[in-house]
Amino acid sequence: MSSYAVILPAAGKSSRFRDQHFKKPFAPLNGRPVWMYSAEKFVNRDDVKQVLLVISPEDRDYFQDKFAANAALLGIEVVMGGSERVDSVKNAVEKVADGVEYIAIHDAARPCIAGEWIDRVFQAAQKGGAAILASPVAATLKRVDPRTNEIAETVSREGVWEAQTPQVFRRDLLIDAFARRGGAKVTDEAQLLELAGHPVSVVAGSPINLKITTRGDLKLAEQAIKALPKPKLFGPAHPFEDDDHWK
């Protein structure tokens, strides 16, 4: 059985979330923080040997007060992030245990992930060395002139997919891609592999696998989670189910 480490980036600014009390990975979703939904899909897998949650240094005290005991209970290692997402992930990659063959990166703010999708992208990564979940774009795309806010052109959606996570890479390929990065600006780890010349397979995911970006997305996630298999990690009497625990 191949071995995996899973990195959960949660160090962003959450500027579009616009909540004075919570950053999006820490916001309550049906009584539990968003990040925990993402984490629980990996911590009980036999092939996952390590789960690392990356937080911003500015959130260290808040996380210690609210969630440190929960992270310890789940066996999750907490890593301090950097100025950009790619720096945060690199910090976590450096903490991956010896002997782990594959590294998966999954957004901590993407709670609606199903085990069968994880299985598929893990299997694809084993075959080709690198794979991501993604969903083909169905909507009509418009390029807009930022000066006038008018349509500049309609963009063909043929062959255009929206990248999701998990994004899974053979460890040596990901480390090589970081070494080759230079000063390039990248928005996800798959782009690192692209720039390094490593092919990345795309595995069909689902629009249900949404990323929390705004507060309105929490309502969508509440409904999406109901359509996913019920978590088996916690029993009905677990304190995380008390909404007041997170207020």
Image (spheres, rainbow, N blue to C red):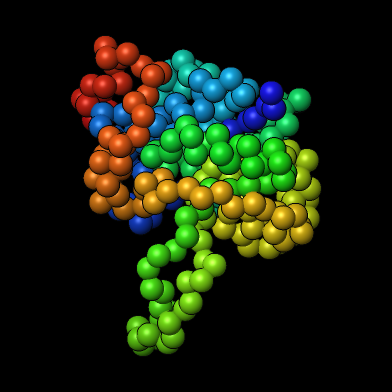
Percent of width and height locating residue 236: 27, 14
Q: Quadrant of the C terminus?
A: top left
Residue at (68, 26) in percent of width and height: 3
Question: 174 left or right of 159?
Answer: right
Question: 223 left or right of 210?
Answer: left
Query: Which quadrant would residue 31 be assigned to in this image?
Result: top left
Q: Nearer the viewer, residue 8 or 59?
A: 8
In the image, residue 186 sits, relative to residue 171, either above or below, namely: below
Q: Is residue 124 shown to the viewer in this render?
A: yes
In the image, residue 150 sits, relative to residue 10, either above or below, namely: below
Count the marks: how many?
A: 0
Q: Nearer the viewer, residue 246 or 207?
A: 207
Percent of width and height locating residue 227: 30, 37
Residue at (54, 67) in percent of width and height: 159
In the image, residue 154 sits, relative to residue 123, either above or below, namely: below
Question: 216 left or right of 166?
Answer: left
Residue at (24, 45) in percent of width and height: 219
Question: Residue extending furthest left?
Answer: 244
Q: Nearer the viewer, residue 14 or 166?
A: 166
Percent of width and height locating residue 136: 47, 60
Residue at (63, 30) in percent of width and height: 5
Q: Is residue 60 shown to the viewer in this render?
A: no
Q: Quadrant of the N terminus?
A: top right
